[in-house]
Image (cartoon, grey):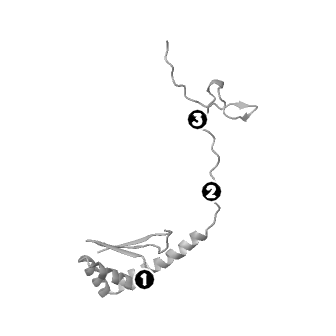
């Protein structure tokens, strides 16, 4: 006796009276493994939180720009920051960075070839995260 083989569902489109009708289903194979999905529903388009996050991140970008300007324009500050970072004096590095960038949640980490400064919001929800890497 011949074995039973899987017969894949193949939808056939057919026309009746010049109009495309729904998918034809053979009576023996009437199970549709690809059910019709309703269109995806999106939440209401409220931009209040989006605008608040953009305002917050604008302030942090100003602080980051101020720190970069301080490094560019003040050679002694740049030497002190790089020197403290290269010998891993993290208290001094944090003090120097926070003297310009007064953001409360500033995390500074150093590698042998760069300094990474991360800014995160102080509140519980994380609406933005900015980081600045400066190589030497």
- Quarter placement of the C terminus: bottom left
Disc ID at residue 33: 3
Which numbered disc, 3 or 2, marks the residue that appears first in the sequence?
3
Q: Residues within 10 Å of mark 1 (few under 14, many from 20)?
A: some
Disc ID at residue 42: 2
Q: Which residue is mark 1?
A: 102
Mark 2 and 1 residues: CB-CB less than 8 Å, in contact? no
Find the distance from the CA under tag 3 to the CA under tag 1.
59 Å
Which numbered disc, 3 or 1, marks the residue that appears first in the sequence?
3
Q: Quadrant of residue 82?
A: bottom left
Regarding residue 132, the answer to whether it shows in the image is: yes
Helix, strand or loop for disc 1: loop
Helix, strand or loop for disc 3: loop
Q: State whether residue 46 is above or below residue 62.
A: above
Q: Nearer the viewer, residue 95 or 57?
A: 95
Report the residue at 40% width, 76% height from top.
106
Q: State whether residue 76 is above or below residue 22.
A: below
Report the residue at 65% width, 61% height from top.
44
Report the residue at 26% width, 80% height from top.
84
List x then y, in percent, for residue 121.
47, 73
Q: Residues within 10 Å of mark 2 (few under 14, many from 20)?
A: few
């Amino acid at each position: 006796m011949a074995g039973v083989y899987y017969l894949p569902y193949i939808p056939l489109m057919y026309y009746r009276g010049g109009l495309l009708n729904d998918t034809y289903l053979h009576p023996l194979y009437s199970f549709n493994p690809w059910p019709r999905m309703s269109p995806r529903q999106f939440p209401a388009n409220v931009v209040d939180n989006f605008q608040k996050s953009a305002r917050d991140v604008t302030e942090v970008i100003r602080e980051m720009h101020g720190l970069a300007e301080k490094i560019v324009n003040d050679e002694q500050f740049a030497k002190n920051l790089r020197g403290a970072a290269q010998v891993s004096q993290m208290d001094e590095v944090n003090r120097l960075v926070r003297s310009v960038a007064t953001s409360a949640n500033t995390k500074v980490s150093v590698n042998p070839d760069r300094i990474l400064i991360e800014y995160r919001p102080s509140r519980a929800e994380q609406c933005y995260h900015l980081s600045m890497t400066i190589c030497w």
